[in-house]
Image (cartoon, helix red, strand yellow):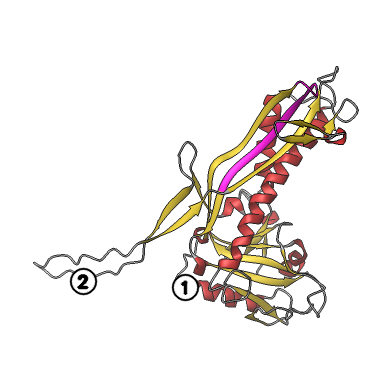
Amino acid sequence: MASETSGTYFTANAVVDKTAAGTFIPEIWSDEVIAAYQSNLVLAPLVKKMAMAGKKGDTLHIPKPTRGDAHAKAEGAAVTIQNATESEVQVVIDKHFEYSRLIEDITDVQALASLRQFYTGDAGYALAKQVDSDLFALGKSFGDNGGDYVGTGTYNFAGSTGLEAYAVDSVAAGDVFNDAGFRELIQKMDDADVPMDNRCLVVPPSIRNAIMGIDRYSSSDFVDGKVVNNGQIGNLYGIDIFVSSNCPIIETANDNSAGGDVKQAMLFHKDAMVLAEQQGVRSQTQYKQDFLATLYTADTLYGTAVLRPDAAFNIAVNG
């Protein structure tokens, strides 16, 4: 039978009892959750991040200045004042996610540390997966994509030699990641005047093998003295490549007559997206006397937005 505590229903199988758990020391819980969260993020560290800790309000206003022009300076003449035409991007802090466990009092409170590490690791993984998933969802607003993946913000590889605009039910099993198509995407970024640095490619695990078959690919395993970030597997044409199991399915195998799930990969510049954190990962505890147990909760509060839609592309890949 369920009991109600502070508006939340707890059932018997939702409680970690002596059989299921050992110890949960609050300080260790907090440190381990944060460590697990940071180690599982792939996409979030690659985008523009802004901290709102301690600031009030639920919307962050980010100026979006336009590029100016250089003017020749004539001797004795005044400088040319350029008109300010800045717009702004609004980031609404509306994503609040939590992970909670109810731990019963137990006698041997210092036992089973490995199980404690599982729960803290699971909390960090769950929150990190949610943040990365929200950033992947921004791909629906790349280019002129109008809330889905069809538009100038999404392409797929055609056969093994090129690139074409993505359309539903068009990605065949033979449309694999290829060198020529990837170079075309890089050209599109160059044409949009996207800076050369801080470009990244994030792909699902199934695409890793195809990338490793490209002659110009350099594995991160053979780059001496370089710090390797979460999920990073190497570099191609100066662009760091990352693998993420969070790459979402944008078209299921049932909807794709060619067979196979169609997943989203992403080529982008750091300034294409923004992650605004009003509250990083926080761990809290509260004793629940009616259960003779401690409620442990980890949560985070943030917002995401597309900052520069022409500086990123989705790649629809089969598999």
Q: Looking at the image, is 271 positioned above or below residue 149?
A: above
At x 76%, y 34%, the residue is: 101
Most distant residue in the left direction: 76
Q: Relative to 76, is 4 on the left or the right?
A: right
Specify whether residue 264 is painted magenta: no
For the residue marked with disc 1, what is the amino acid? Ala
In which quadrant of the rendered image does the C terminus lie? bottom right
Q: Secondary structure at mark 1?
A: loop
Magenta segment, principal secondary structure?
Answer: strand
In which quadrant of the rendered image does the N terminus lie? top right
Do tag 2 and tag 1 residues touch (Cβ < 8 Å)? no
In the image, which disc is placed on residue 32? none
At x 56%, y 46%, the residue is: 302
Q: Position of residue 258 (x, y in %)?
A: 81, 80
In the image, which disc is placed on residue 192? 1
Q: Which residue is mark 2?
A: 72
Q: Looking at the image, is 228 positioned above or below residue 82?
A: above
Q: Which residues are magenta?
A: 289-302
Q: Looking at the image, is 313 positioned above or below residue 11?
A: below
